[in-house]
Amino acid sequence: MENKMKNKKLTYIIYTIIVILLFSLLIWLGHFAKFQEFITKIEQSSFDLRQNIIYKNKTPNKDIVILAVDDATYEYIMDKYGSWPISRQIWSDVVNSIENANPKYIIFDMLFVKPNLSDKKADNNFINTIKNNQNIYLSMNFDNYSDEIRKSEKLDDKLKLKIKEGNLIDNPYITFINCRTIMKELIEATKNIGIINVTRDSDGIIRNTTPVFKYKGDYYPNLSLAVAIDILNQDSISFKDNKIILDNNHEIPLDTTQRAILNWYGKSGTFKHVSFWEAVKASKENNSEYFNKNFKNKIIYIGTTATSLSDIKSVPTESNLAGVELHATFLNNILDNDFIKKIAPEFDLVISILLSFFVGYVVLKTTSVPKTIVLLVATLIIYTIISTFIMANWNIWISLVMPYITIIATFILIYCEKYLMKSKDYEQTYKLAVTDGLTQLYNHRYFQEQMINQVNNYERYGNVFSMILIDIDFFKKFNDTYGHQSGDCVLKQVASILKKNSRTSDIACRYGGEEMAVILTNTNKDEAIITAEKICNTVRNNKFILANNEKVNVTISVGVATVGENGTKPQEIIEYSDKCLYKAKESGRNQVVSKI
């Protein structure tokens, strides 16, 4: 019982060491960029999978409307006006019509970069429209072009984001050296200008957005962040604990790149879409009912959704999502406090360790292989369901890939170790079953099995073998004189001589009582006699130590038989060697006999 407990304790220690070594290996691999990239790509795909599951139960903000320059609008514009971009007079007319419906905000996800020199009046009208309506937001973007391509400009101080507390850490996602400005007159007309840069992950999919940008040492807001600050009646933000704090109820958690992980509401068309050509037509017709129905008290994003205008992005829930919907999603996340928060790698490690120990325990306790595999698969499925549930209800991104790797690796390694140990136990059990406990020679049953095998090899391949049968002379009288303990000592020492004077391919066995046998593989009669004489002489010349440490001499008689010459069946060979042994005893013992 005590040994069983010790073995069980040792088993748990071995498996604990396996888990520790596994995690040490993973941590070491984590220092390699290629391994990190591989894990990141798979984890991002798992994020996309979960987002596609949970978005079906999410409802986007009903106040956000997309005024879309869609494919139908593009056809309408080309047919009616003959070119794109259109005159800014049309923008002025549509915006003024929308303003008459009292919208909350009008947000342009479009760049008005250069003036139209052939239509200055339309430009001026558009500029005045922007100046007269402080609920309109315009867009601009940053880049990293050198001054040789485009001279970087200093932006008006009114566009800067006011920071009450904290700073962001510079990184390629937030820091830029150049700016693609919009018309100077538009910048002079309003301070409501935000940045619309987007960055893709290495697989080309956009999962994050940059809330705050750094340019020439100053901070500037993302377009949707600028709108959100206005909606929440704030004039500044704070950076604290890797979060952007807007007010007591709204904050934006940042990842290690200082970006926000977006929570997606669905595929293209999630938000209400109104086709821009309809608005153009309604404006010309002074259709106030149309504008009140679609835009009254709404937050309106104006942007292109037409594939021909090339503002299409790939996101977790959609491979072709218009950029304007991405910005609307960011604003929706801010207003609903709905961002995804990825847990720290340390927590992922703890979860992986706990799951690994659980799987290891299951492998140890479950004897059925199918049951163990079912439990492994069930563990992976349940963990996936739990992680998806947590993301859906608490917006927390728990890693799937590292736990999956550690669970499966632990399962494989411990299963291999478990069955390796079982194999060793089987070998040990088998050895005990075929070994004589006193002499540590093979027992009689094993001897019989090997005799059959050797005869079969002889019949099939012509492999000759011999056997020698040994009997300790006057052993019964020896036991009566010195006692059975001393007899056992002699048996063990004779057995040791047999093993030392046999090849590793030979099979030394205890035949029964004081009789022993050696099967000499690939050995003819002459070679067998040499080996038998060597063993006989060694026993004769050896001093045997008894139980009382007394030293005595012992002799043996030996019979030799060879397959083919003395028989072709196991029993015939054994009988012949036994007759030779009997003849050796009759002839005075302490000798080898090979003929009868």
Image (spheres, rainbow, N blue to C red):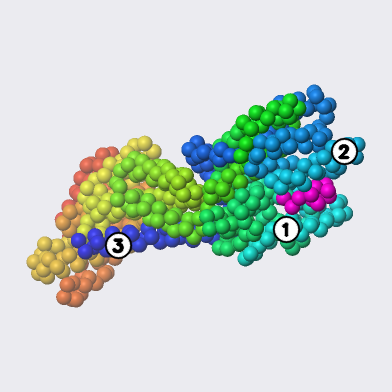
In the rendered image, residue 476, in percent from the top left (x then y), is placed at 11, 62
Mark 2 vs mark 1: give the one in front: 2
Q: Which residue corresponds to the image point at 23% horizontal and 41% vertical from the top-left?
A: 572
Residue at x-position 68% and y-position 33%: 68
Which amino acid is tagged 2?
Lys
The one nearer the camera, 224 or 399, is 224
Q: Residue furthest top?
A: 79
Q: Which element carries disc 1, helix, strand or loop?
A: loop
SS at circle 2: helix
Instruction: Give the x, y percent position of residue 389.
Output: 44, 45
Residue type indicated by callout 1: Lys
Q: x%, y% of residue 567?
A: 26, 41
The magenta stretch spans residue 189: yes
**Badge 2, how many Cα within 10 Å: few under 14, some, many 20+?**
few
Judging by the rendered image, the residue that carries numbered circle 3 is 9
Label 2 with label 1: CB-CB less than 8 Å: no
Magenta-colored span = 180-192
As drawn, the label of residue 160 is 1
Q: Which residue is mark 2?
A: 121
Please identify, in this view, whether the residue under mark 3 or under mark 2 is nearer the observer.
2
Residue 226 pos. (x, y %): 66, 51
Mark 2–mark 1 Cα distance, whole angstroms, equals 30 Å
